[in-house]
Each structure stands twice: as structure tokens, then as C-alpha cells.
Amino acid sequence: MCGIVAYIGTEKALPILIKGLRRLEYRGYDSAGVAILNKGSLERTRAVGRIDALASALAEKDMAGTMGIAHTRWATHGGVAEENAHPHVDCSGDIAIVHNGIIENYRELKQQLSAGHTFKSQTDTEVLAHLIEANYQGNLREAVQKALQNVRGTYGLVVMHKKEPDRIIAARLGSPLVVGVGEGEYYVASDASPMLAYTQQVIFLDDGELAEITRDDLKIVNLKDEKIIKQTEHIDWNEAEAEKQGFPHFMLKEIFDQPTVIKDAMRGRLIAPDGTAHLGGLSMTSEQMASVKRIILIACGTASYACLAGKYAFERLAGIPTEVAVASEFRYSDPIIDRQTLVFGVSQSGETADTIAALREAKRKGAYVRGIVNVVGSTIARETDGGTYIHAGPELAVASTKAYTNMVTVLLMYALQFGRSRRLTVATGERLVKALLEIPEKMQLVLKQSDVIKQLAEKYKAYSDFLYLGRGINFPVALEGSHKLKEISYIHSEAYPAGEMKHGVNALLSPEFPVVAILTSNALYDKMRSNIEEIRARRAPLIIVATEGDAAARELSDDVVSVPPTMELLEPLINTIPLQLFAYHVATILGRDVDRPRNLAKSVTVE
């Protein structure tokens, strides 16, 4: 998830592009670059690091051009290095491109182009520049259209050509692009934030659309060159709001990002006809996979709760004994590890010091060591022998939300991959794949209840203690819900398996001690319902997360949040969202800084 900004008009492009990149830096912060048509030349400058590094590199350059493209990168293909920074160019240096998304068949395309083209980066984007070059016959729009007909994957891109100084081309499939409409000028960006200082009139490109933009005109077509009529829309956000796309906080934006980013996590990895998943980053042969007798999932905090959900999946689908180890304790426990042990280190940042140390210990003892991380080029990504990026995009709020659900998704796909290689039938695999693909739409249904959950937050904001309960796969959900409440609202909260209530926790129950219980329709429904009956008898206020249409849950509880049904192993992907929203709304009502809660950091890089 990177940031694109482009300008064509009568003003100097560079200040507009740099300001736009700063607005988009939340989308990517590994490297940045610009390409400007300046005095007949296509001039490109790139720098590793944040936008300030690029601005410094440009400080002494005389850039008077009025057309240009720019990009801030969050690395996906290729490490964090200047040669992998955007914009990328073709062999001649006449074509420049910026791109968001993933070109799934870029290796195939690169092989096809290898005879006549020289590649200077490890990125999928550079392949697009050369593919457009191969199709260019004097008309940039036609070249882009022809090139994209051979592309499999996702893109939001902007292209310019030195020989066409009054034209830029933008195209979208799966990665957002917005065109800002001014007087004799146009802007293009990943979202509206970079252009709101100049115009609030915008056009949102839809998938499969291509925009040909000059200083005086905008033409939108599809890849078949059929004209499309689009309406200009007025944006009411101000610049500060736009950075968060109209959301008051990054955390809320990231909660609402989940239906989109979970698609990114699954894209290209689920194989529906075979009822399986394939995560190539595992980097294990069939024989090596068959040799695994034990799995250890190592993580901290929210990532560890994702791992607990993963444990259920590995054991149920693949029949592999799986344990979750708290990273900060792992290497001090003299862990028993052998060459039949597969260890996953799970971390959003890939820089969590305790997790890195634990993985190094596991590697020393001979285990297969793999990473599940969000940040490309991070220490865990570099030091493990393989693994998977979760593709959640930059997560700027300290409290993790979308990274959590994407971690669970990746672990589920790994469990499916191992399960199908061992004992899982095609039919069961097909049902699981189908249910996974339905999750984004079901997430949307839960997010629509945000205002209802806000009313619950108003009702319960004054309580100083909470208890979260779940059973089976929903125990990790209770842990994560409790964790979110305490870290951003500063309210004391605990989570327990509901079956443990009789072993001491019942002593805490009172009318001043609200309980949040997850009671969705699964194999442990009756057991969980009995536990809730015990709580009700002790007059503790009850909030129940229940499956749609569950009349019994409404009779038992003071308040109910309904969620759509799904397969039991997938319930954490749905049931966690109302708990995220509840924590968020309680915290904002109490006036907390939800994006930057006290005493916490996004990445814990010290022990």
C-alpha cells in the first residue's frame, strides 16, 4: 500500500508533488521519488527513507516543469533500496511510471521481455514500464491499454512519456485512484488528501478504467477503449481530515480498512478448485512439510492472540500439535526443539526484539524458522528462511486492528495448506476457501453497526473493570477484545475461557462488573450459554456478541451485537471487529488519544 500523486497544469509541479507525498506518507515510508518533465527532459529523483530525504535530494535542483508524477513506497516486491524506489523507467528513460498493487504474473512478463530489455530493480512495477515500452507506437494511451491486457494482478498507476509533454495516463484495478479537477489543471492521487488544498472536485476511477489527462481535458475509457461518462463529486473533507480519509482517527480508518486488506492477504493464495491455499514463501518441499511433527507460533501481544486462533486451525485442519509461545519467555525456558519443528515468528513490524531473539534461538536449535510480518525488509523478514507478508498496508495507530485479522487469515491459510497435504478432504477445503472469500462482505455488515456499538460505549463508559469471555476459537477473540479496551481506554480488563469462571473468577461478578461474552453458533454454543446463565444469575451486566437471529441471546443479555454466521475457525475474523469498535468508541468518549495511547509504541524494538 503506497502513495501516488501526479500533477499536470500550469503551476510548478514539484512543490505540489512534495506536499502531496507528505499527505500520503502514512501509506508508505520506505522510499520516495518524483519524475518531472523539465525543459524537454524527463528528470527523475529518488531517495530511501521518508519524504524529507527526497526533499533534501531535490533542494539544489532547478525543476520548473509543470507535469510530473511522484510516489512514496511501502515495499512489497524488492527490498528497501533506491533502485527499487518509484518512479520506474523503461530502457530509453522516456517512460516513467508509479504504481500501487501487485502484478502477480510479473515474473512471466519479465521473462518474455528479457531478450530486449534491461531491468535494474527487483520490483514488479519496472516490468510495467518495459511492457508499455514494448507496446508504444506513438500513442501512450494505446500502449498502456495494450500492456494492461497482459497483466494479472492489481494496480493503481500513472504513466508519462517524454515525447508526449501534454498527457498523463492513469489506470486502476483493485488499487484506488482519484482524479482532482481544477481550472486548466488536474491532479491524480491514491486518495483525495493531496489535492484538497487545490480542489474539492474529484472523480473516483473504478476498476478497469483508464484516464487520459491533458491540461484541458479528461477522457475516461476502459481497456477496450469504450468511453465512460463519470460524474464529478464534491469532497467536504479538509486537509487534516483527508489524511485519514475522513475518519477522525487512524485507528477507526484501519478498522474500516479490514474488508479491503483481507482481500490483499488472500489474493493469489487461495486455490478454489483444489480447496487449498499456497503460500510460496513457506519455501518447503512436500517432503519437508511431511516431516513437520510440531509447530510453535512465537509472538507478543495482539500477534500472540492471532497465533492462538492459528493454533486451533493447525490442530484441527492439519492434525499437527501446535503451541503458542510468548516471545519474551521463549528463549529463557530452554525450549525443546528439533529438526521436525516448524517455528513461525509473527510480528506486524517484523522488528519486535523479543520475537527476533526467540527466532534466533529456534534457528540455533535446528528448527525450520519462518516469519509472518507486515513490513517488507524488516529484520524478521531478512533473518528467517522464508515466510509470508500479510499485506495489511501501513498501520499507523499503535493499537493493531487490520494487522491482527490479516495475521489470523495468513495462519488459517497455512493451516489449510498443511491440512490438504495431510488429511483434509477436497470438499472440506472447498468449503473453507468459499467461507474465507465471503469474509470481506461479512466484515462490512459488522462495520455498519458502528453507531449502534457507539451507543453501547456511551452506556458502559463509566465502568472501571470489564471481563471478556469466550470458549474454543473465541477465547483468543476475548483476549484480543480485552487487550484493545485496556490499551486505548486505560480501563482495567481481563479475559478468561468461560469454563474457568467457577475456578475463582465468579467471585468478581457484581452489578458493577460488566461482562462481554462471545456466544456465536458453533460446537460450544450450549456450553457457553450455560456459563452465561451463571453470570446472569449474579446480576453482572452482560454484552453478548451473538449470531444474527439468536433470540435466546437477546433474552439472556442486557445488550447484543449481532454478527453474520461463518465457519467456526473463521469466527475470529468476524467476532473481533465489534470488540475493536467497542474499545475505540469507549476510548474516544473518554477523550483518550486512541492513535497514540500513553506509554506504548507501535514497534517494540528493545527487550
Image: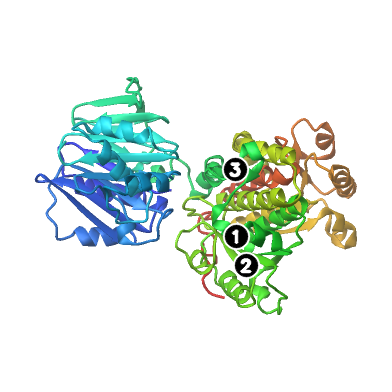
Whether the residues at callouts 3 and 1 have beta carbons within 8 Å, the answer is no
Q: Kindly state the secondary structure of the residue where label 3 is placed.
A: strand
Query: How far separated are the C-alphas under marks 3 and 1?
Result: 18 Å
Report the Cα–Cα distance between label 3 and label 2. 23 Å
Q: Residues within 10 Å of mark 2 (few under 14, many from 20)?
A: many
- Kindly indicate the quadrant of the structure image that contains residue 230: top left
Question: Where residue 87 appears, x then y in whole percent?
Answer: 28, 49
Q: Using the rendered view, name the quadrant where residue 522 is placed.
A: top right
Residue drawn at (80%, 33%) of the image: 550
Q: Is residue 88 visible?
A: yes
Which residue does the numbered mark 2 point to in the structure image?
A: 368
Secondary structure beneath label 1: loop
Residue 479 x/y as whole percent:
71, 56
Callout 2 amino acid: Tyr
| Outermost residue toward the left in this view | 39
Q: Which residue is mark 3?
A: 270
Q: What's the CA distance linking mark 1 and mark 2?
A: 9 Å
- Picture layout, residue 116 above or below residue 387: above
> Which amino acid, mark 3?
Leu
Residue 109, percent from left and from top = 38, 44
Q: Is residue 48 visible?
A: no
Please tell me the numbered disc located at residue 284. 1
Give, as a three-letter code, the residue at label 1: Met
